[in-house]
Image (cartoon, coloured by chain):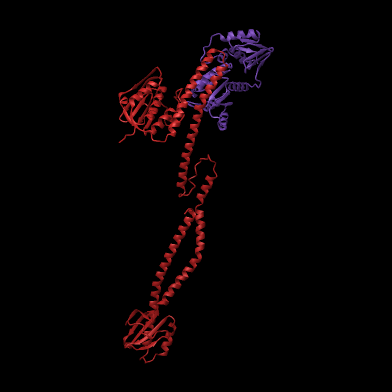
Chain colours: A red, B purple
Amino acid sequence: MRSLRLRLFAILIAATGIVWLAGVVWIFAGSRVEVEQVLDTRLQEAARMVASLASGFESLPGKSAPGAIAQLGSYERQLSCQIWSLDGRMVAKSSGAPDQQLSSTADGFSDRTIDGETWRVFTVEDASHNLRVMVGDRLSLRERLVADLIKGLMLPALLIAPLLGAAIWASVGQGLRPLRRMAQDLGAREPDDMRHVETDREPVEVRPLAMALNGLLTRVEAARRHEREVSAFAAHELRTPLAGLKTQAQVALAAEDPKVVRGALEQIVAAVDRSTRLVRQLLTIAKLDADVADAPRSRVEVGPLLSEIVEGTPKNAGTIVTIEASARDMVVDTNADCLQLALRNLHENAVQHTREGRIVWTASSNSLLVEDEGPGIAPDEIDKLGNRFFRGRSRSPIGSGLGLAIVKLALAKIGAEFTISNRTGRSGAKSELTFPVRT
Amino acid sequence: MRILVVEDDPILSDGLRAGLSLTGATVDTVATCEDADAAIASSRYSAIVLDIMLPDGSGLDVLRTLRSRNDATPVLLLTARDSVGDKVSGLDSGADDYLAKPFDLDELAARLRAIVRREGGRAAPTLTYGSIVLSPADLSATVDGAPMSLSRREFAILSALMERPGQVRSRAELEERLYGWQEDVESNAVEVHIHNLRNKIGKDAIQTLRGVGYRMGAAR
């Protein structure tokens, strides 16, 4: 059922109906037993009464005693009475009573069917007066009595039912108001309104929903902030080089001093080089983003790959790069292109941040490690490293903030894990990539 | 004009230094908030060109610190974002003007001249004292309507004196106008420039107050 109100209404109506029906069944069964007891007692009393009356006559004549019968007449409609002698002669009977003997039992209660009708009979035997008094009533009468009782109960209930239905419908509506209010509140909001839904005022049942909603709002807000941040960084990283280019070009045009002109032109060349690198990195990211297919794997020897990267990356004169034997001999089952991208960007990163010192590549069983002697990373920036266009405080002048983003993307493609941290006990950063263990 | 450029991009920063120098300004460049705070605390600038996104924080923080010290130095913000909200928050933080990257160098220089002029309480684009008229926009000068050729430094000293006639400018103050940090101060350069200026605009135009400094016009 799509409507919560309708659903609650149906459940409540069904539950109420079941309770009612159970009550009726219970009352029916209980009343029946009760009625039977009361009527049985009446039979018993009537029989004893008739027996004591009959025993008042000294001797019973062959015919009925008119006075006695007249007294019995008040039971006519419901009760029938027969007086028999012990030898099987009918002495007297009430007017509505059948001619056939009501019971064959000597004493006590018995049921008997006469002419298709079932009789409940109580018999009293008075041996001293040679009498047997039988008083009985029809079972159909008893059934009617119980049925009338139940009908008397059901009628008002049936009249009340529509009222009850209306009351339940209205109450359910009232009970669901907090939900409606929340929906209205959320519906009326501006698209960028990420305020939390108030949970203290809401009923306990709605609170989990409100809290889940708040959790979602928090995550959406974080995602939006991240997006804004990335776009702000992107704008900065893309527009600043353009501003540099334009300014230097205008300087070259305006300056008369050949030294100044030359300096500006050299800066323009440097700016174009840097922009070229930026474009290359952007294209790499776009390619990694678009490439959804699993990268094909092969046996990749890390040693030659690393040597090629290290030789191809210009570094500061005071920097010494070492590839230790453990890394040189490492062989990984992975995608060569992704690994090369990751290693090149990691190496460039290390080189850019190490003005003077050692960069060391090492390996253990399934992880590859590069350590530099640069300034390291500010602790509050570690989480942001790898966000596109993010450049930390210790940024290098030619960085674009895309290198680590590329590393992350490329390593995610080959299922390798990547962590970057500060070296303990000394300045410098440590990047570790851990390859998945293939079984 | 002595200008502080706070910009972390080395190529843009160098371009600004070279470009603004061409317009007669003396330019210091720094790349971080920290260095910017230190520079502002140690020297007086005619104006500051401030990038918002700096490696160690936001340029807006530098701006707020500056304004909280009641420093009225004109500030022009440079930023990569050019949405209305960014401009509003920049100007509301105490900036005097705003330019989105990439910008035109001539426009930047003109805007700097404008905010500096306003800060000095002048609306006219030229400086006038007696028969001398200086036009900072094109570094041109005239005496009695006749063009006069001034070197960049002569122009800087003369405009410093003409900005506030009657007020004494100390030698250190004038040196600060002439030299950025990167430049070595020649010991008697100010005296030499003043001497040359007197030759061009008349012996009595600039008065020397021994041990105090230089002044144009009568004391106020």
What is the quadrant of the C terminus of chain B in the image? Answer: top right
In this view, A8 is above or below A72: above
Image quadrant holding the N terminus of chain B, namely top right
Q: Is residue A385 visible?
A: no
Q: Is residue B32 above or below residue A73?
A: above
Pick the residue in front: B183 or A349: A349
Tell me, yes or no, if residue B39 can be seen here.
yes
Residue B220 placement, left or right of B45: right
Q: Horizontally, is A43 left or right of A243 in the view?
A: left
Residue A327: quarter of image:
top left
Q: Residue at x 53, y 11 (%)?
A: B185
Residue A13 at what x, y percent from top left?
47, 60
Query: Could you tell me residue A84's position as x and y percent?
Result: 35, 87
Q: Is residue A433 above or below residue A42?
A: above
Q: Nearer the viewer, residue B58 or A228?
A: A228
Q: Position of residue A371 (x, y in %)?
A: 36, 25
Q: Residue at x 32, y 24 (%)?
A: A328
* Quarter assignment of residue A11: bottom left
Tell me which corner region of the image, top left, top right, bottom left or bottom right, holds residue A26. bottom left
Q: Return the x and y of residue A241 as percentages of the image width and height.
A: 51, 24
